[in-house]
Image (cartoon, rainbow, N blue to C red):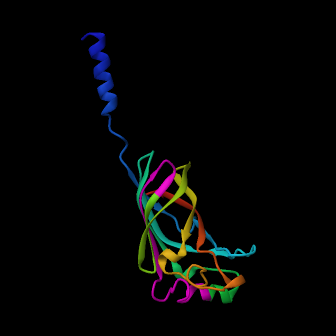
Amino acid sequence: MNPLSLLLFASLLLAFRSAPAPAVYQVSPAASRLTWTGYAETGTWAPFGTLLLRRGSFTYDGRRLRRGYFEFDMTTITHAEEKLQEHLRNADFFDVVRFPSAVFKLNEVVNGEARGFLTVKGITRAIRFPVSVTRQGGSLRVHGTATIDRTRFSVNYNSSSFFQNLGSYAIRNDFQLAFVLVASPSK
């Protein structure tokens, strides 16, 4: 075999080598953290609290994170002030009696951007947000912050897009959900 043929053959082998088989990772709800932050339309008031992940999983082939399913327990939305916490849980906001879960279905992460579909209050919308994935021993840490327009999910309470003359009672449409998810390969 001449050197040119050998080089061509080696190039073809490299081009068609198989990628590592994707592994399914299970997210540990106890080791993961989700924090939400809302914002007043005027001023600096920015209430925040936590939300628990009920379960989550995704596939990872060593390079790409894909096919994820993340279920959030909306009944666990918290805030330090009991009155606001209960208000967030009622029909003005997330109506957790009727909609106890929210779901994010991840299609894939491309160039550090998660792409998928979020379902809140029975309404599904496409969303994108930045994420990063790091290895920590045999586990993966997925962290990022999604900025979500609540009005796209019929959470319109005190939105100046829907109500006039709210003054200092107006709440911005966007809120942020910051997260750190810890996941290990399924056994």
Say which quadrant the N terminus sits in: top left
Residue stretch in magenta: 87-114
Figure check: 132 above or below 167: above
Residue 181 visible here: yes
Say which quadrant the C terminus sits in: bottom left
Residue under the image location 52 percent in, 53 percent down: 139
Measuring from the top left, give residue 113's x and y in whole percent. 50, 54
Which residue ends up furthest to the top in the rendered image?
2
Which residue ends up furthest to the right in the rendered image?
43
80 falls in the magenta region: no
Measuring from the top left, give residue 48's x and y in whole percent. 67, 74
Number of marks present in the image shown: 0
**Foreground of the two, 77 or 167:** 167
Give the left or right position of residue 143, taking residue 102 as reference: right
Give the left or right position of residue 31, taking residue 84 as reference: left
Residue 186 visible here: no
